[in-house]
Image: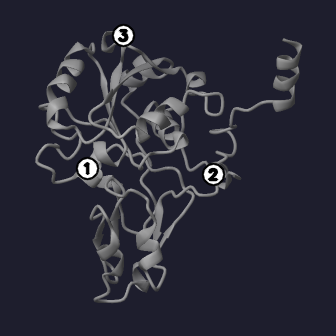
C-alpha cells in the first residue's frame, strides 16, 4: 500500500487543465482543417480524388470546402494538395449544433451554440447520458470511455454515462445506424424521459462515414428516429475526448468564446 501511495504522489495531478488551460493534445492530433481557397488551382481535384469519404465538396478558388461531418481526418487531402490549400490544424473545436455548420470553407468556425435557457437550467449542472453503439467499430466508443478517465475526467463537469436510458437525459449515438439497430435505437429513445437530448458522435453517426451509401446503413443519425433532430454533432474518426468535452460544455452554456489558450496544448 505504501508503494502504491508513493507511486501516486510521483505521478502528481494527471487531469488536464482544459477548459481553463491547455488541452494537452497528442502530437499526431488533426483538428479543424484550415483552407486557403485562393491557393487552389482551377481544375485541380487531387484532394477530392484521394478522399475516402467524399468529404471534399469542392475545389478551385472560392469553391474549396470540406465536410467535417464526413471527414475521417486521414490527412490524405493535405498530402495530395501541391499548393497546401488544405492544412489540418490543432483546433479541437469541431462540435456544432447544425449539420450545415460542419462544412468548412476557410472562414472562422461557428462554435456550438448553447441550449435555450430552460434546457440549460435542467441540464447545465448534471447531465446523464446513455450511449448507443449503432453499428460502430469501437473507436468512438473507446474515446467516449476515455473521456471519463483520470486524464479528462468528464465527471468533474457533472456529465456522466449511465447504464439505462430511463436514468438518462439524452442519448449519445455512435456508428452509421445499421438497419438492424434502427428499432433498438428508436426503443432506447422512447425509453429516455423527456425532455431529452440527442448527440451524434463520429463521422459514421453524422454522415455514415466510410459506410455511407451502404444498403444496410442509414448514413448516420439524421432521420433515424422519425421527427427527432440532432442537438449536437461531434465530428472525428474517432473524436478526441477534448472535442467531445468542448462540444458538451458549449451546448450547456458553460464554455463561451474562443479560449485560444486551449489550442496550444503540448503533446
| Relative to 54, residue 152 above or below | above
Q: Is residue 50 left or right of residue 245?
A: left
Q: Classify residue 216 by image quadrant.
A: top left
For mark 1, does the 10 Å Cα neighbourhood hold few (<14), some (14 to 19), or many (20 or more) residues? many
Q: Position of residue 75 (x, y in %)?
A: 46, 66
**Residue 34 against residue 238 in the figure, above or below:** below
Name the secondary structure under disc 1.
helix
Which comes before the other along the chain, label 1 or label 3? 3
Q: Nearer the viewer, residue 159 or 186?
A: 186
Q: Quadrant of residue 229?
A: top left
Going by the image, does 10 lie left or right of 65? Answer: right
Mark 3 or 2, nearer chain start: 2
Instruction: Tell me the crowding category of disc 2: few under 14, some 14 to 19, or many 20 or more residues within 10 angstroms, Cα based.
Output: few
Disc number placed over residue 167 in the picture, else none: 3
Residue to which mark 2 is pinned: 26
State left or right for residue 72 relative to residue 134: right
Residue at position x 53%, y 39% in the image: 241
Residue 94 in picture, x, y percent from top left = 45, 50
Query: Label 1, label 3: how many angstroms apart (C-alpha)?
Result: 28 Å
Which residue is disc 1 drawn over? 207
**How far apart are the alpha carbons under marks 3 and 2?**
34 Å
Q: Secondary structure at mark 2?
A: loop
Q: Nearer the viewer, residue 113 or 87?
A: 87
Q: Residue 249, how many percent across, how many down?
A: 50, 34
Rendered image: mark on residue 52: none
Q: In front: mark 3 or mark 2?
A: 2
Amino acid at each position: 500500500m505504501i508503494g502504491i501511495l508513493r507511486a501516486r504522489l510521483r505521478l502528481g495531478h494527471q487531469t488536464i487543465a482544459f477548459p481553463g488551460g491547455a488541452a494537452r493534445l497528442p502530437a499526431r492530433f488533426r483538428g479543424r482543417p484550415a483552407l486557403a481557397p485562393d491557393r487552389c488551382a482551377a481544375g485541380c481535384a487531387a484532394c477530392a480524388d484521394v478522399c475516402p469519404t467524399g468529404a471534399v465538396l469542392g475545389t478551385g478558388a472560392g469553391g474549396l470546402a470540406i465536410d467535417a461531418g464526413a471527414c475521417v481526418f486521414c490527412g490524405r487531402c493535405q498530402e495530395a494538395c501541391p499548393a497546401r490549400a488544405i492544412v489540418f490544424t490543432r483546433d479541437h473545436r469541431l462540435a456544432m449544433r447544425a449539420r450545415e455548420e460542419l462544412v468548412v470553407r476557410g472562414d472562422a468556425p461557428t462554435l456550438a451554440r448553447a441550449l435555450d435557457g430552460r434546457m440549460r437550467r435542467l441540464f447545465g449542472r448534471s447531465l446523464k447520458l446513455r450511449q448507443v453503439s449503432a453499428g460502430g467499430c469501437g473507436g468512438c466508443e473507446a474515446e467516449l470511455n476515455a473521456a471519463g478517465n483520470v486524464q479528462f475526467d468528464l465527471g468533474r463537469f457533472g456529465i456522466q454515462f449511465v447504464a439505462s436510458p430511463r436514468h438518462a437525459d439524452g442519448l449519445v449515438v455512435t456508428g452509421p445506424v445499421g438497419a438492424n439497430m434502427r428499432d433498438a435505437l428508436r426503443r432506447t429513445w422512447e425509453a429516455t424521459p423527456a425532455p431529452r437530448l440527442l448527440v451524434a458522435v463520429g463521422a459514421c453517426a453524422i454522415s455514415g462515414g466510410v459506410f455511407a451509401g451502404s444498403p444496410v446503413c442509414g448514413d448516420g443519425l439524421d432521420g433515424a428516429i422519425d421527427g427527432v433532430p440532432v442537438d449536437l454533432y461531434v465530428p472525428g474518426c474517432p473524436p478526441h475526448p477534448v472535442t467531445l468535452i468542448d462540444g458538451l460544455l458549449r451546448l450547456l452554456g458553460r464554455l463561451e468564446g474562443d479560449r485560444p489558450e486551449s489550442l496550444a496544448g503540448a503533446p
